Image (cartoon, rainbow, N blue to C red):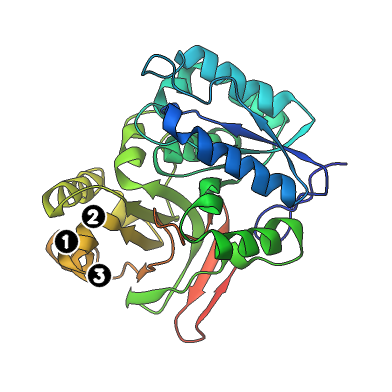
Amino acid sequence: METIRNQKGYRFGAGEMVALTACSNGIQPDGKIKIEELCSVLEKMGLKAWISPCLYAKGGSSEEPKERAKILMDCFLDHRMKGIFDVSGGDLANELLTYLDFEQIKQNPKPFFGYSDLTVLVNAIYQKTGHKTCLYQIQNLVRSQKAWQEKAFRETFLDEGATLFQAAWEFWNGERMQGTVVGGNIRCLLKLAGTEFFPDVEGKILFLEARNGHWQAISSLFHQLKAMHVFERLSGLLLGTFTELEGEMGGQSIRSLLERLCLPKALPVAKTFQIGHGADSRALVIGETLMLDNAMKRVYS
């Protein structure tokens, strides 16, 4: 049975297999308990979890980039795998870029999920193949908000709903934006700068979030995007959570940073506290065309 895509993501059938990969930093040994719990949760929901042989760090380091890339390619080419959920994060996802066969991925598309450092791959895959990918960390199913996450996961990927793709947005500038979404973690996205893998931002909606980074660090990353003339080419800017910054300076701190940035006055800007590194985070599809309308308080795709 082929994977069926629903309106805002993907739907998996009972008994189907999904892959758990680690394309960035390998999971440390003390994380094995959580992975085992995750597999149990998926099994309880009727899914079979396949664990990458490169999932865990060995000797304190990750498997070689070429081997991790081979595993990811195998997952795309293996018709038993109906979706790929990357459970890693850190720094090493961009090691895989030159070892991936994007033409093969284009010819064998399937749902690919990851967040944080996987921003590198979800954007590179969309840029090189045109196929949608998804910012989402499946380990949220075994974190502090696991009860809500499991319910939302079931509704979104096993039933007919789209709970994980429903987030509340507040407009900080403008009333409406429409375009195709690219982006993710700001630090990791900028690792693609100057390469063929950086997303085409012309007329796009750019989503940005961050886990780590004090005010100075986050400001420097936004100014790098400004120096690349990114903001003047967008149809909209979506902001997720900036965990460390907002924890230290409050939820409006990123707004003050943007005021110093002097964005184009006509650029619509919207903010959510429901997508990012939090255990309660929703998901966002890279490559999906969205329309946000402040007047009607609606999000359309």
Q: Residue at x 67, y 61 (%)?
A: 156
Q: Residues within 10 Å of mark 1 (few under 14, many from 20)?
A: few
| Residue 254 seen in the current view | yes
Is label 3 in a helix, a strand or a loop?
loop
Q: Residues within 10 Å of mark 2 (few under 14, many from 20)?
A: some
Q: Is residue 264 above or below residue 20?
A: below
Mark 3 — residue?
251
**Cα gap from disc 3 to disc 1, whole angstroms:** 9 Å
Q: Residue at x 67, y 27 (%)?
A: 75
Disc 2 residue type (three-letter): Glu
Q: Which is nearer the eye, 200 or 43?
A: 43
Is label 1 in a helix, a strand or a loop?
helix
Query: Residue 21, position in %: x, y?
Result: 57, 31
Mark 2 — residue?
244
Q: Residue at x 64, y 64 (%)?
A: 151
**Cα gap from disc 2 to disc 3, whole angstroms:** 10 Å
Label located before the other in sequence (2 or 3): 2
Disc 3 residue type (three-letter): Gly
Query: Residue 49, position in %: x, y?
Result: 69, 36
Q: Residues within 10 Å of mark 3 (few under 14, many from 20)?
A: some
Mark 1 — residue?
248
